[in-house]
Image (cartoon, coloured by chain):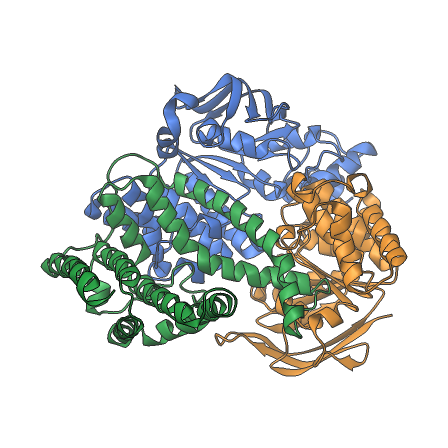
Chain colours: A orange, B blue, C green
Amino acid sequence: MAAFDVAGVSFTYPNGTAALRDVTVAAAGPAVIGLIGRNGSGKTTFARHLNGLLRPSRGRVLLDGADTAGRTTAALARTVAYAFQNPDNQIFHRTVGEEVAFGPRNLGYPASGVEARVAEALEMLGLAPLRQQHPRDLVFSHRKLVALASVVAMDTPVVVLDEPTTGQDWEGVGRIERLVRDLAVRGKLVLLITHDMDLAARTCGRIWLFADGRLAADGVPADVFADTARLAAAWVEPPEIMRLAAPPASPRPRSPSRRRSIA
Amino acid sequence: MAVAAACEDYTFWYEGTSVPALASVTVAIEAGTFVGIVGRNASGKSTLCYSLAGLVPNFYHGRWTGRVLLFGEDAADLGLAGAVTRVGFVFHNPESQLSGTSLTVREEIAFGLGNLGLAPSEIAARTDETLALLGLRDLAARSPYALSGGQQQLVVLASVLAMRPRMLVLDEPTSELDPVGTAEVFALLARLKAAGTTLVVAEHKSALLAQHADRLLWIDGGRLRADGTPAQVFGAVGPADGVALPAPTAVARGLAARGRWTGPLPVRLEQLVEGLPHGRI
Amino acid sequence: MASPDQGLAAYVPRPTWLDAASPFTKLIWLGCAVVWAVAIPSPPALAALAAATAALAPLAQVGRPFAVMLWKIALPLLVALALVQGFLVYGFGYALLQGLRLLVVMETAFLFVLTTHPAKLVASLLARRLPNTVGYVVLATLQSVPMLQRRAATILDAQRARGLEVEGGLVTRLRAYLPLIAPLVLSALSEVDERALALETRAFSVPGPKTHLDPPREAPSDRAARWLLAAATLALVPLRVLVWR
């Protein structure tokens, strides 16, 4: 079970923008945590500290008890796999299978271990039939799934998904939801950075709301999304379904999880 | 009502392909209306957008049967210049749509007007008018690259509107934007609609689209599978069709399956609440 | 090099004579610099020309960005050139000559880019009835460098996050750049696609003369400057034949 512990982390970009201000939070798997907040709120900056893509200006990031300082991103990739938003920024192999194998190979798994992880990742994302295809021959949403598979195949305890459903249609969103649940079932700690509040409400057990570089809220979706004042101050709209829970005509508010039993 | 754009039994194949991207599409877009397009990825939504903007076949080449009429003229006969001066087009990536030649938002909006060869005084007048109309005066002197995604997309819209197109086609304009940016874009679209602009918008955010569009077109596998009010189209869409239903619609469909909802499907929350017996589920 | 605020251009607006000179004049200057660099066979003369050109930077108030471009672009290129040509092929004397030639051209190019507003450059070219495709190529070239830089940084991050080691010895770092090339080229190509579409929607290909919100002004000093540049270039002919062999 992976744990990370972020203590008093602040981060300022070279051009002077303070992107994170004194953030302290900890988490352990298995769990699915949603990171929400408007662009510039610090959620992505925060996530990039977990695998050393960014280093704190102040404060400390501990991964499994050890400080991330002094370890390269590639070394930290053993623990934290980070899936970037644009698949075309990473795909460079000639087949889907080779692309998905890149990550586990870098981590030093033996050939059999690589093969097992690749097969499993392809299965989880429904990509097994496309294994021999050239990624560039696939449509964008499938290339996105290939990029996700290549990160999932690294079989790390922590997985960060950076806006995985941008540009996806309803089916694609469903596939990613299933992926997130499968990862949690396998004991992973999943961090889901997303603008899709309904997705966050459906899949996350915990929500971190970022605003102005600070962690403005940390709780279960029902609580975080019910705090309409705090959401509004953070320029975040609650999930569509929450608005069903509090219209003037309805006698009792209902939480998103209870809504599932109606439909 | 006048027809702004129409497809007449239109089938289109991109160059070098054997499967048509659009098949036998017949639809008429009336002037002054807001028409939304929904459908899964690779359904033909973008091709339909390009066709209604005349970019197919004048920019993206291929072969076709049937025809597309833009303000009464065949789009293929208009050529690229004719198409872009009649129909404005905006797509999902705000940064790629910035010309890269402008240091300020004002210059960015003026870019298209300079390309049209208008006199500098006319360019200045129209730029100021557009900035005022869209409420972007505060951003006029800022670099387009220093803006948020939502603001950039507003600048892109302004740059296209300054050219005074007769119709505006938008292909997933908010897919790269955060909710704030999305709200800004849709607020602008609402104002344009109120001012009588003809709008065609393809989106995955069907709930938001349904709140603004008078009419929805559902494209799937290149075919027009449904054409009607949002309630009608959402009624036709199935769970595996790749189209998200607004929450009130999904709830009502669930209720209808249990025999506890009759009548047209709600698209808005108020419609759902009104239709619930005794105001409770 | 280019701050996010400047986006795609390296242009630094300054109220100097070099900035105010018409883009066309500066383009002529760049062309002349190439001719001079190729025609002059003497390293000391080239060094003097390079020094004189570099001296223009502080005079045009772009000293700092100029130095940054020298450091980040010119220096690595020249070092690579010296290694290849000096060690492996032709000997150091030749490498020095070629290096100085390249330096003169690069310095002029840097000054050109730093003091020329890209839109005004394109407008002045298109006003001279240059075909649209040429104008587009100029635009695309101006746009591409900072864009590729930013994209390369993102791609590198994405690959590092998949366990690609980029920190360490020279060999490790060189090998790390391989997974960069394909995504960089491909994403550059698809972005070019999108940009081409965007330019079309702004009537870039609509026939007819193009204008600009703030058209570039031709001053009498511009014509004089162009004559001077032409004269200096022509003066090289006797110099080359008689003085330098």
Locate residue B262: give its quadrant: top right
In the rendered image, which quarter contains the C terminus of chain A?
Answer: top right
Q: In this rendering, would C6 be left or right of A237?
A: left
Give whichever of C237, B135 is nearer the camera.
Answer: C237
Give whichever of B198, C232 is nearer the camera.
Answer: C232
Q: In this rendering, would B60 be left or right of A207?
A: left
Horizontal and vertical percent position of residue C86: 47, 69
Residue A255 is at least partly visible in this image: no
Horizontal and vertical percent position of residue C223: 12, 56
Give whichever of C219, A259 is nearer the camera.
Answer: C219
In the rendered image, which quarter contains the N terminus of chain A?
Answer: bottom right
Give whichever of B233, B100 is nearer the camera.
Answer: B100
Residue B194 is at least partly visible in this image: yes
Residue depicted at 43% across the width and 72% down the height: C92
Locate residue A162: give its quadrant: bottom right
Q: In this rendering, would C55 be left or right of A201?
A: left
Q: In this rendering, would B155 be left or right of C56?
A: right
